[in-house]
Amino acid sequence: MTYINFPRRIARFQEELKKEGVDVLVGTKLKTVVHLSGGFVPWRSAIIVPAEGELQLITSALDAARLKDETWLDNVVGFGGLPGLDFMDMIAARIRELGLERSTIGIESGTSNYLPDGFITLYEYEKLREAFPEARIVNAVHIMDRFTLVKEPEEIKLMRQATALVDYAHEVVRDHLRVGITEKEIAGIAEKVMRDRGSQFAWTFTGGQEIASGYRTWWFWGGCTPATDKIVQCGDPVMIDLHGMFWLMLGDVAHNAVMGEPTREQQEVIDAYVAVCHKVVEEMQPGRTLGEVAARVNEFVREKGWAEWVLPGFGHGIGHFGHEWYPCVAEAPSPGNNEPDYVLEPGYIQMAAVVCNRPGVAGFRLERPLLITEHGNEVLSKLPLEPWIIDCGRSCARR
């Protein structure tokens, strides 16, 4: 068990609000709600964070009792479809209780490729504006985004465990890979193993355990690969992207296999993929910006002639439930997605990622959590970067 000092975390965050001149934050992003409550919060919710004073979590009335029991917060209330219990009515009531009707109110507005981010909606903003016409409403989305980049030591410890249980599931999947197994069967094996080892949730909205084989691995620049009824064949590349969650921290490891000896063309893709993976790890060094890392890897890819195969982005954010996208490793800025000017610092964890797909031949995906240290980095996953080669004769014999 790992103790996380939530009062200390909250006090630090409230200091950030004061620095930004925000008197109270209406936190609607999933990342914010989870980070400050310490709970698994799947419903539309808001956490009301004054710069001084007690926090209040406003969540679905269906789930409020559980969250009051499982989070560190005492002040958890439910909203529902009854007079006076509307979501925005309860947010407004809490701000009035705090006496902050004429204060600076922070909201979380923005955009992202990641669907469940939880930005405030236009309806919610307008209701807030209507309720507090004398307040100053500012966008404070950047505060939590920056606050969660460097992980607490306790979070790093839990990330190691989350990654270890996903690594183990990959090893079990490797031992069960055979010609004739379906992608859904592979996903089921992995899910059971991770649950048995302590995973609480197959968290990704892109399909839980993502499994692809054959042609489903080589779509141009990748794609979501939720497991299907497709049967694995001899000669298929197999992409295995597993997701677990250990005490809210997310385990995410993508690895690959080839059923049988690779063809000459498949080996060319493997060689390119492995070289780019090593390059990404090599370039993720403290003191460099994410944009510099992306530029160095992209230059390497162009020099090798692999630009048509390799996606020109090399990672995404990772942490606890709700922190699964920002910031990505790319050269160009993109609001809510890429932050090229962010300087890598010790304690930061990046999901290092490589997509190398050659349509008609093979596709491979890397995802490995990478921790920035004082003098370099550490890949938390202990799996090899090279794809596994599965003997088709062995796998056929096991049917």
Image (cartoon, rainbow, N blue to C red):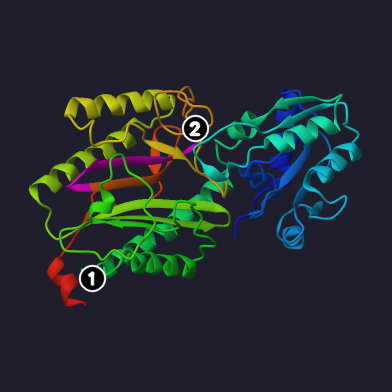
Q: Which image quadrant: the C terminus?
A: bottom left
Q: CA distance from mark 1 to mark 2?
A: 39 Å
Which residue occupies the foreground of this view, 331 or 369? 331
Question: Residue 381 appears at what percent x and percent y?
Answer: 38, 50
Asked whether the residues under the numbered discs 1 and 2 touch, taking CB atoms below 8 Å apart as contact, a structural biologist would say: no
Q: Picture coordinates of residue 184 (x, y %)?
A: 36, 66
Q: Is residue 221 left or right of residue 43?
A: left
| Magenta run includes residue 127 | no
How many residues crowd mark 2 within 10 Å: few (<14), some (14–19), many (20+)? many
- Residue with the mark numbered 2: 337
Q: Helix, strand or loop at disc 1?
A: loop
Residues shaded magenta = 348-362
Depicted 261 relative to depicted 356: above or below: below
- Residue 63 image position (x, y, % from top left): 72, 60
Q: Nearer the viewer, residue 380 or 94?
A: 94
Name which quarter of the figure residue 60 lies in: bottom right
Residue 256 vs 342, above or below: the answer is: below
Residue 358 in magenta? yes
Name the residue tied to disc 1: 180
For label 2, the SS is loop
Q: Amino acid at mark 2?
A: Asn
Any part of residue 323 in sight: no
Question: Is 206 on the left-hand or right-hand side of 388?
Answer: right
Comes first in the chain, label 1 or label 2: 1
Q: Residue at x 20, y 32 (%)?
A: 306
The answer to whether any part of residue 315 appears in the image is yes
